[in-house]
């Protein structure tokens, strides 16, 4: 059983469209991280959000941490084929990371 | 900085053999290392946490006699899959942190294990 549920599980969109990925939990985390993983490689950290309600922007990616620090969202504006990959949220508690169920994004040129 | 290396990146072996996977922190001392398993099209599941010089802590459902973890130095942890069977085939990923609490994990590139 995973503590963090991501939706949607799969997403296929056209280049230039916008999208939002959700990461939900009933548990509180000290911080929440978002990763992107390419096939056959380890996950690469995109961002860490720490404060409830915090919003961070990374070029076309906007990350938000829920006020209660239980959920998060990732919004991508004008998606590009290079955004294709597996997006994982991960909640931190003490020294452990609990990964979400994952969202596999495909951006079609 | 903060590079973690895994070796081998891909291994194929016969059922019944034991396989050792190495995880090295190349430019920092890792007091804590983590081992994850990822099945196709699924997320990462934590298998165990190891602290240098002490026994690993295994997650519920992970057989400690099957997945032997050794963290004998501050830069190296090993995962040995003993008497591997086809159901052990998976993508194994390690990560490392330089300190014990609330530090980011740095991930290796994973090891794809295929048991025939």
Image (cartoon, rainbow, N blue to C red):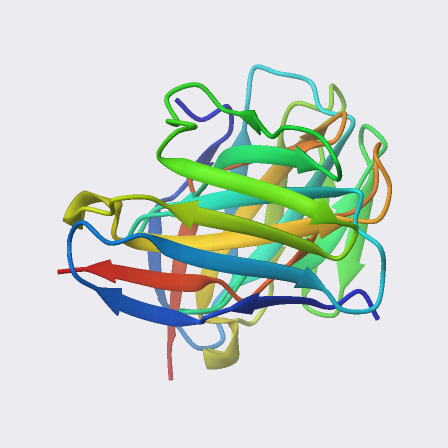
B46 to the left or right of A76:
left
Closest to the observer, B8 or A47: B8
The count of marks equals 0
Q: Is residue B16 above or below residue B57?
A: below
Choose top left, top right, bottom left or bottom right for residue A9: top left
The answer to whether residue B53 shows anywhere in this view is yes
Residue A98 visible at all = no
Which residue appears at 85% of the width and 32% of the height? Answer: A51
Question: Percent position (x, y) of residue B17?
Answer: 24, 54
Q: Is residue A36 left or right of residue A107?
A: right
Q: Classify the position of the C terminus of chain A by image quarter.
A: bottom left
Q: Of residues B104 and A109, which is closer to you in this image?
A: B104
Q: Position of residue A81 (x, y in %)?
A: 46, 80
Quarter of the image where one finds residue B114? bottom left
User: Does residue B91 appear to the left or right of B85 in the view shown?
Assistant: right
- Name of the residue lying farthest toward the top: A26
């Amino acid at each position: 059983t995973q503590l963090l549920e991501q939706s949607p599980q799969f997403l296929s969109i056209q280049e230039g469209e916008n999208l939002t990925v959700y990461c939900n939990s009933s548990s509180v985390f000290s911080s929440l991280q978002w990763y992107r993983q390419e096939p056959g490689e380890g996950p690469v950290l995109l961002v860490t959000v720490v404060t409830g309600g915090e919003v961070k922007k990374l070029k076309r990616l906007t990350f938000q941490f829920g006020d209660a620090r239980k959920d998060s969202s990732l919004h991508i504006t004008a998606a590009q084929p290079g955004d294709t990959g597996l997006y994982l949220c991960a909640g931190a508690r003490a020294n452990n990371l609990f990964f979400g169920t994952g969202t596999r994004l495909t951006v079609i040129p | 900085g903060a590079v973690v290396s895994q070796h081998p990146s891909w291994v194929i072996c016969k059922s019944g053999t034991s396989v050792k996977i190495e995880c090295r922190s190349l430019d920092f001392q890792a007091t804590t290392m983590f081992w994850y398993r990822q099945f196709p099209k699924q997320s990462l599941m934590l298998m165990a946490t190891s602290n240098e010089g002490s026994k690993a802590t295994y997650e519920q459902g992970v057989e400690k006699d099957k997945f032997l973890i050794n963290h004998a130095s501050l830069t190296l942890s090993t995962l040995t899959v003993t008497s591997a069977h086809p159901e052990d085939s998976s993508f194994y990923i390690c990560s490392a942190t330089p300190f014990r609490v609330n530090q980011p994990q740095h991930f290796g590139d994973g090891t794809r294990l295929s048991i025939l």
